[in-house]
Amino acid sequence: MKNLKSSLRKTLLARRDALPVELSSAYSQRITATLIALPEFANAKIIHSYLSFRSEVETHCIRSLAFAAGKRVAVPMTSADNPLLLHSFIDVEEEFTTGEWNILTPKNPVIEQSLTLSPQDIILVPLAGFDRRKHRLGYGKGYYDRFLATQAAITIGLAFSCQETDLIPTEPHDQALTMIITEREIIR
């Protein structure tokens, strides 16, 4: 199973990486517009947003719009020696630095070891690929699956349509998402 997921991950990430920057930027803007128009976004008090890197769907604008709408924003933090996702609430003027695996991290985080979000809050989830069943293929470390298993919040995968595949192989610990938003559609 691990080899199958690894091979599929490479294929799907290559597709995402092949998108021209101008196109991925335009698609990210479209995905952002779709997300913020959702009633779920309007009703959320907290947005837990990954900090985009490499060719992921851009999330900076989403965080800015969440602040403008009076929401609290939390971001994930990882550590190679801790299998659990850590969290930090940020403010609109937060400064970032490069952390583990070249992922942005708050410069002066206030680390939350555990975070419990309500059923109306939103977790924006990064992914390498997805299928129509709303299963995601992550990056292989399991941080998000462990985190999502403890949360009642709405989970939204942000992806480009080129990251879709017929079937994501799943294991018992893999967590399906509430919805996936691409530049073309919302999969519920």
Image (spheres, helix red, strand yellow):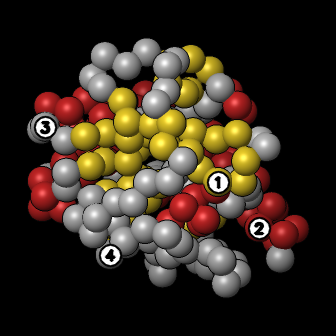
The numbered mark, 1 or 4, whose residue comes first in the sequence reads 1
CB-based contact (under 8 Å), mark 3 and mark 2: no
Q: Nearer the viewer, mark 1 or mark 4?
A: 1
Position of 175 with respect to 8 (left or right) is left
In this view of the protein, which residue sits in the foreground, 168 or 88?
88
Measure how far apart labels 3 and 1 are at the Cα level: 28 Å
Measure how far apart labels 1 and 4 are at the Cα level: 27 Å
State the residue at coordinates (19%, 55%): 44
Residue farthest to the bottom?
Answer: 172
Which numbered dot is residue 70?
Answer: 3
* Secondary element type, mark 4: loop
Measure how far apart labels 3 and 2 are at the Cα level: 39 Å
Please give the residue where the numbered disc 1 appears in the rendered image: 84
Q: Nearer the viewer, mark 1 or mark 2?
A: 1
Measure how far apart labels 1 and 2 are at the Cα level: 21 Å
The numbered mark, 3 or 2, whose residue comes first in the sequence reads 2
Q: Nearer the viewer, mark 3 or mark 1?
A: 1
Name the quadrant containing residue 123. bottom left
| Structural crowding at the residue carrying mark 1, measured as other residues with C-alpha within 10 Å and reported as few (<14), some (14–19) or many (≥20) | some
Instruction: Kindly identify the amino acid type of the residue bearing the numbered disc 3.
Output: Gly
Please give the residue where the numbered disc 2 appears in the rendered image: 5
Instruction: Kindly identify the amino acid type of the residue bearing the numbered disc 1.
Output: Leu
Q: Residue 171 in the image: state x and y as whole percent.
A: 70, 81
Which numbered dot is residue 188?
Answer: 4
The numbered mark, 4 or 2, whose residue comes first in the sequence reads 2
* Secondary element type, mark 2: helix
* Secondary element type, mark 3: loop
